[in-house]
Amino acid sequence: MSPKSATIYKGKTGQWAFVLHRITGFLVFMFILLHVVDISTINSPHVYDAIHRLYGNVFLRLFEVGLLFGLTYHALNGLRVIMIDFFPGAIKNEKQLFYFMFSLSLLLTVIGGVIILRPFFTGSTH
Amino acid sequence: MAIRSLAQKTGDSRTSTRKPRQNFETWSWYFMRISGLVLFFLALFHFFIMHILNDVTATNVTFVATRWKNPIWRLLDWLLLALGLLHGSNGLRFIMDDYIRKPAKRVVVKSVVYGIAIIMFIYGTLTIVTFKG
Ligand code: HEM
């Protein structure tokens, strides 16, 4: 293999799986930091409840759906990485496994998204 | 990460001429997989209860007070906090090693990230432990 073809590595499924895994892992970590702060207001009940009413706002509900996608993708792809590492056969189906995990995380996000956004559509929230 | 660790495991001569041995990176590699498996259940279960079964606006102080009456929930929430922060900051360590090339800058950024993770761990632990309900 020439050095050029060895160093230029473009867009195979495994690389996309990795890039998305990295981005979602990073974003979920950022969310944990925010979450520790919002939960810490629990000792000031008014602040805590005000924040959780705010989370019912449609933009923050969309953010919640985004978190659901980040978390389910990272979790399912993490499982795919673990399967590939520990079961020698799995690498042969690495691509199909990626499509499966990615579709499953999309499906779970859509189902969860409908449930999370429903109060907005039925008008039971602002 | 996966490639470096695989080379360690198999002693792949292209990337490693030494014999594989158990070092911090091997340990870290296993830790990511074991904590990942535990987080798979903890994090998804947590999201399911707090965001799917219940609406975010319903998870108010009264809700948490009822939940945290049971020490098992406090323990599970604390485990999620501890494992999430550890797994996440170790993951961030891979990312920082990959993208921050200048040694001095790497030390500074890593110190800030680890510092924040430690402070958040203590802060979160205090919240869970000191809540009276
Ligand atoms: C929910 C279940 C989870 C599973 C199954 C899982 C699995 C994994 C695995 C196996 C790796 C190592 C990948 C490798 O060595 O190539 C990894 C990396 C990582 N994880 Fe997770 N994880 C989970 C949850 C989380 C959470 C909650 C966070 C954030 C707090 C997180 C943040 C990260 C980060 C930042 C990386 C580094 C990504 C990289 O090196 O590109 N993970 N995860």
Image: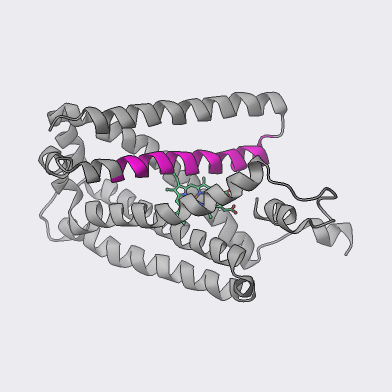
Residue B28 visible (yes or no): yes
Question: Which image quarter is the C terminus of chain B in?
Answer: top left
Q: Is residue B73 left or right of residue A109?
A: left
Q: Nearer the viewer, residue B119 or B11?
A: B11
In the image, is residue A101 above or below residue B10? Answer: below
In the image, is residue B101 above or below residue B31? Answer: above
Q: Nearer the viewer, residue B133 or B61?
A: B133
User: For residue A35, what is the image quadrant?
Assistant: top left
Q: Position of residue B81 (x, y in %)?
A: 36, 40
Q: Position of residue B41 (x, y in %)?
A: 36, 57
| Residue at (35% x, 52% y) in the render | B43
Q: Position of residue A98 (x, y in %)?
A: 54, 69
Number of marks in the image?
0
| Residue at (76% x, 50% y) in the render | B20
Q: Position of residue A118 (x, y in %)?
A: 19, 61
Q: Main secondary structure of the magenta part?
A: helix
Q: Is residue B80 magenta?
A: yes
| Residue at (39% x, 35% y) in the render | A33
Q: Range of the magenta residues?
A: B76-100
Residue A24 visible (yes or no): no
Q: Is residue B10 magenta?
A: no
| Residue at (67% x, 42% y) in the render | B98
